[in-house]
Every structure is written in C-alpha cells, then in structure tokens.
C-alpha cells in the first residue's frame, strides 16, 4: 500500500500500474489523482472513446467492467476503466457485493497491458481504516491510501519543491511555512511559487511567511498573550493545548508569540512618545479595533518586560533551530519564564 507522495513520484517518472485501487476520506483528492493518471495516458482528443466509467453502487456483476477492460483502445496505447464508489471493496457479508468482489479479485491478475483499471472506495469518516479486502488486493494491484500529507512528509515534499526552483529555505522557516499550508500538493506548489516571487532573489524569512499568511488564529494569540500578561499559567497552557489540537505546531505558536510581543513593544514605545492611535494604525497597517486591543494589552507589561520577552523568544527560537530539544518543552519554558518576569 502506497501513499500520495509515492504515487506522485511514480506518475512523474511515467511509471504506471495495470490496476489501481484508491481509498480514503477525501473523494475530491482521489478524483484529482485519477484525472492525472488519465491525462498522462490518454490523448484528450480520444478521451470519450478510451475512458469508461462505472458506478460501483449500481453494478450487479463485474462482467461489464471486464468487457470494457478487454476491449482494445481506439487510436491510443491505453484505455482507462474506472469503477467509482466501489463499495464492494468494504468488508461486507452482502451476497451481491461479495460476488462482485470475488470476480474482481480473480480478474485483477489478468488485466491486459492495454488497459488501466481503476477503482476507488470512499471511507465513511476520517477514522475508517482500509478493509481486509483492500489489504488482500495489495498483493495483486497498486492500492493507494489517500491520506493528506502532514508533518515531516509534507515538509520533505515542500523542501523538494523549493529545491526544484533552486531556492533554499531554513528548517525553522520551512516548518512555519508548512504550518500554513493545506496538504493538497497542487495548491502547495502554487503557494511556493507565490512565496518565491514575493521574496524575489533574497533569502526567505519568517516575516515573509507571516506577511503572506497572517493566519487564522489571531484571536487565540491575543488570548494567549492576555493570559501571560495576567500571570495565568494554567489558562495560557490551555490555549496552547487548544492551538495544538487544532493542528498548529509549536514553532508557529512561538513565532506568533514573538510577533505579538514585538507589536506590543512598538505600540507601547509609540504611545509613550506621544503618537496617536490613528497614526499607529496607519504606520502598522492595522485596523483601529486591533490597535485598541494592542494598546490595552500593552498596558499589562512594562517596556522592560516586553524587551525581555522578545529576548526570551529569540533565545527559544535559536535553541529550537540548533538542538534536538523537545519543542513543546521549550515552548512551555518560554511561557513560564515570561509569566515569572518581574
């Protein structure tokens, strides 16, 4: 059983199998990869003649699929036969599904080289696992589990995309960038292109990434910093846990804390030097209600404390970049050191 990254590597190398079975929760992602296989193997001018589809829910037997697969392609080296929503691939005692599955299992060993037979089965929810039938078929066909790419696998693919463009990105910046991305590799490539164009020929920085992806969780960061200012350790850690539960990585939370305190320091310094809130909004390109919130928040800290917190953030960032320390531990230490500042 292969994953989406392995599938894409094979497609790029023009390595194709006679039979594919896709399974996963995201039907649109499955369709996207099937369309890629079809476009690579069939001339668009003859697609109607060489691309045959069957609704797996309406099949009464597998003979019609076999007949389509055995028919030679027209003006093409390949034809593609698709059985979508092939629910007979789930573990079931239903007599019709069992019969269709048995016929397919027998035929899959004999798919002609002129055909690519593709089936897909959509999981009912994100927790569903591949059936025993799918694992059994993995011996005779290419079974692709269409999990979206997360974590290190996503980072590895993103790094490859940067290298293809002869661009480098630091490990910390890579993690921050990936924390803003969906796992659709088509969208990922577009976002990488956007970031490379934005940075032009210079080194990509975390500020570039935060400028392009201001992120959805601003209110969470406001709450987190509010609790830090109020010296409420438990509530602060609860917000961190909530952010991580929503999929945010420690490095992103750290960067957003650092960014927030830098903003607070600018706000406090400017207010102390007589600047108005409207002037601040124009200079920082922030709407008035955000400026008002920042001004109120800045009052929870002295200028010295704000400078000290920024130093703590930079130190934590350096530690994360240069050591193998647990990121969660370093983030919690940052919070404790900030809350205990005098």
Image (cartoon, rainbow, N blue to C red):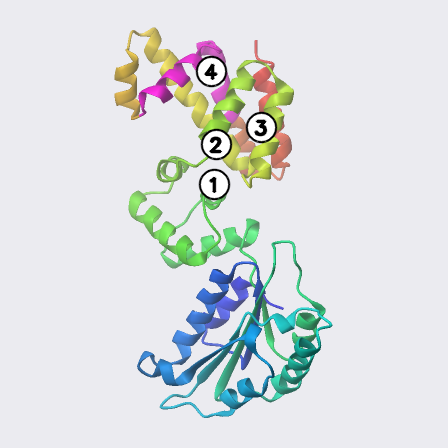
Return the residue at label 4.
306
- Quarter of the C terminus within the rendering: top right
Q: Is residue 198 left or right of residue 130?
A: left
Image x and y of residue 239, in percent:
58, 28
The tag earlier along the polypeptide, 3 or 1, is: 1
**Which residues make up the magenta segment?**
286-313
What label sits on residue 239 in the rendered view?
Answer: 3
Local packing at callout 1 (Cα closer than 10 Å; few below 14, some 14-19, many 20+) is many
Residue in front for this viewpoint, 261 or 285: 285
**Residues under labels 4 and 3: Cα distance?**
20 Å
The percent coordinates of residue 78 (x first, y second) are 44, 85
The image's mark for residue 176 is 1
Q: Earlier in the sequence, mark 4 or mark 1?
A: 1
In the figure, 104 relative to 147: above or below?
below
Q: Nearer the viewer, residue 131 or 186?
A: 131
Mark 3, mark 2: which one is toward the viewer?
3
Is there CB contact under 8 Å for labels 4 and 3?
A: no
């Amino acid at each position: 059983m292969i994953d989406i990254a392995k599938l894409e590597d094979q497609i790029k190398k023009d390595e194709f199998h006679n039979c594919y079975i896709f399974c996963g929760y995201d039907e649109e992602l499955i369709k996207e990869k099937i369309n890629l296989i079809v476009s690579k193997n069939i001339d668009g001018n003859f697609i109607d003649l060489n691309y045959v589809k069957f609704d797996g829910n309406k099949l009464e037997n597998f003979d019609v699929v076999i007949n389509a697969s055995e028919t030679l392609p027209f003006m093409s080296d390949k034809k593609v036969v698709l059985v979508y929503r092939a629910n007979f691939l789930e573990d079931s005692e239903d007599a019709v599904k069992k019969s269709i599955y048995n016929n397919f299992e027998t035929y899959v060993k004999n798919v002609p080289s002129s055909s690519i037979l593709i089936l897909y089965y959509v999981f009912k929810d994100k927790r569903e696992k591949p059936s025993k039938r799918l694992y059994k078929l993995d011996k005779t066909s290419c079974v692709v589990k269409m999990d979206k790419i997360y974590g290190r696998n996503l980072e590895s693919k993103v790094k490859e995309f940067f290298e293809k463009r002869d661009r480098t990105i630091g490990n910390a910046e890579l993690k921050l960038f990936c924390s803003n991305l969906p796992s659709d590799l088509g969208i990922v490539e577009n976002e990488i292109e956007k970031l490379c164009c934005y940075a032009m020929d210079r080194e990509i920085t975390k500020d570039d990434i935060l400028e392009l992806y201001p992120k959805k969780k601003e209110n969470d960061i406001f709450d987190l910093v509010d609790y830090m200012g109020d010296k409420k350790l438990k509530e602060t850690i609860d917000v961190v846990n909530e952010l991580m539960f929503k999929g945010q990585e420690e490095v992103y939370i750290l960067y957003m804390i650092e960014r927030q305190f830098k903003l607070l320091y600018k706000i406090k310094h400017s207010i102390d030097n007589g600047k108005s809130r409207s002037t601040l909004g124009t200079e920082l390109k922030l709407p008035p209600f955000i400026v008002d919130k920042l001004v109120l928040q800045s009052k929870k800290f002295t200028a010295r404390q704000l400078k000290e917190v920024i130093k703590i953030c930079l130190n934590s960032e350096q530690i994360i970049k240069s050591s193998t320390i647990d990121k969660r531990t370093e983030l919690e230490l940052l919070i404790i050191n900030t809350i205990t500042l005098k």
